[in-house]
Image (tube, grey):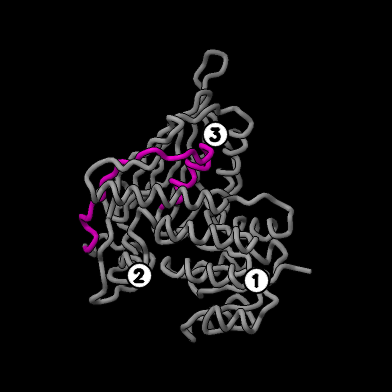
Amino acid sequence: MSIKIGIVGAGGMARYHVPGFRAAGAEVVALADPVPEARAKAAAAYGVAETYAGLPEMLAARPELDAVSILTPNKFHLPLALAALGAGKHVFCEKPPALNAADAAAMAAAAKAAGRRLQFNFNNRARPESVAMMGYIRSGEVGRINSAQAVWCRRYGVPGFGGWFTDKSVSGGGPVIDLLHMLDLVLYFMGYPEPEWVLAQTFSDFIDNHDFRGPWGIPDVPGGKIDVEAACHGFVRFKTGQVVMVRSSWAEMTEREIVQASFQGTKAGGLVQRLFARDGIDATSTDRCELYTVEHGRHVDRRIQVPQDESMGRLASAGNFVRVLEGKEEPLNTPDQAVKLMRIVDALYASSAQGRPVQLA
């Protein structure tokens, strides 16, 4: 029998979750969202027959569901995940895992207690270039990764003013938490070492300047909150002696957009970089995946060829969740890694607020 999944949230990520699950052989049988127009529109677009006002109604009507996929604003990840796990369902949740490390830890504990799978949509791990790079890392060709740089910076990328993205009580923060994909990716490449201390500084310049609005058409909310950062620069040291530089921004005087994970290993360095073929549109036709090494006394740059993936790994990430439930694949990410990632995010904010390094070990 195929895996049966219910979707919570009628937002834009449904266009990846639904086909990703279905391509892996699962059935998407229900969709829940509190806004009637939104859930009706999404259900029609993705061919989901049954809709509900919320997760409790969906669970009551469809007790045979195997899993729940959460595509809501960040504030709701914890309560929805706890409710689904408590009902005995597996959970696939959009990033970030939660508002903070404590919430992520509560989700991880609930999954362990329920004996159910909890995964997050860190889709950049599933991108073809990341998969290729991990092949080189796992084969030993890179050696020990000593240092890495996680960068996702936008010159103009504020996703609407006054909406949930700029309200810290709902989002958890600005670009530090929204654009944490590259931090997760370099940690993944490094084997997710244990963090020791974090030093960071956030900046709020331009966060309410409409010249720095992003191109995604997210509406402003007049009178809404704008209490998140515009940019962050940070540094993480791990117990292993490895280090990571972190840089993220929605609004900063930089290039149009820089999205890359780079590292320096004892045998080779590497770069995974997203380039944008169309301003404001996610495109992967010019992505770079490169290794830098020395061969036969000569310095060599290797350009690794990978197929295009316009979904940016999102279809593959959703498919991995289904295949994990079927026992066919290992999970692309674990709850423990999510907790560790959110501890670093918390520490980036704490270090900036306190004006000093924050000890984690």
Q: Which mark is residue 303?
A: 3
Please state which of residues 309 and 202 is positioned toward the viewer in this rendering. Answer: 202
Does residue 40 lie above or below 206 as drawn? below
Could you say which is closer to the camera, residue 207 or residue 143?
Answer: 143
Label 1, on which residue? 5
Q: Quadrant of residue 134?
A: top right
Q: CA distance from mark 3 to mark 2?
A: 40 Å
Task: Find residue 55 and report its horizontal and vertical position in percent.
Answer: 55, 78
Q: Quadrant of the C terminus?
A: top left
Q: Amino acid at mark 3?
A: Arg
Q: Residues within 10 Å of mark 3 (few under 14, many from 20)?
A: few
Question: Closer to the observer: label 3 or label 1?
Answer: 1
Report the quarter where the N terminus lies.
Answer: bottom right
Task: Determine the secondary structure under disc 1.
Answer: strand
x 46%, y 51%: residue = 181
- Count residues near mark 2 (Cα–Cα under 10 Å), then give few for <14, some for 14-19, many for 20+: many
Badge 2 is on which residue?
164
Q: Earlier in the sequence, mark 3 or mark 1?
A: 1
The amino acid sitting under disc 1 is Ile
Q: CA distance from mark 3 to mark 1?
A: 39 Å
The image position of residue 246, as x and y in percent, is 36, 43
In the displayed structure image, the side of residue 287 where residue 158 appears, left or right: left
Q: Contact, CB < 8 Å: mark 3 with mark 2? A: no
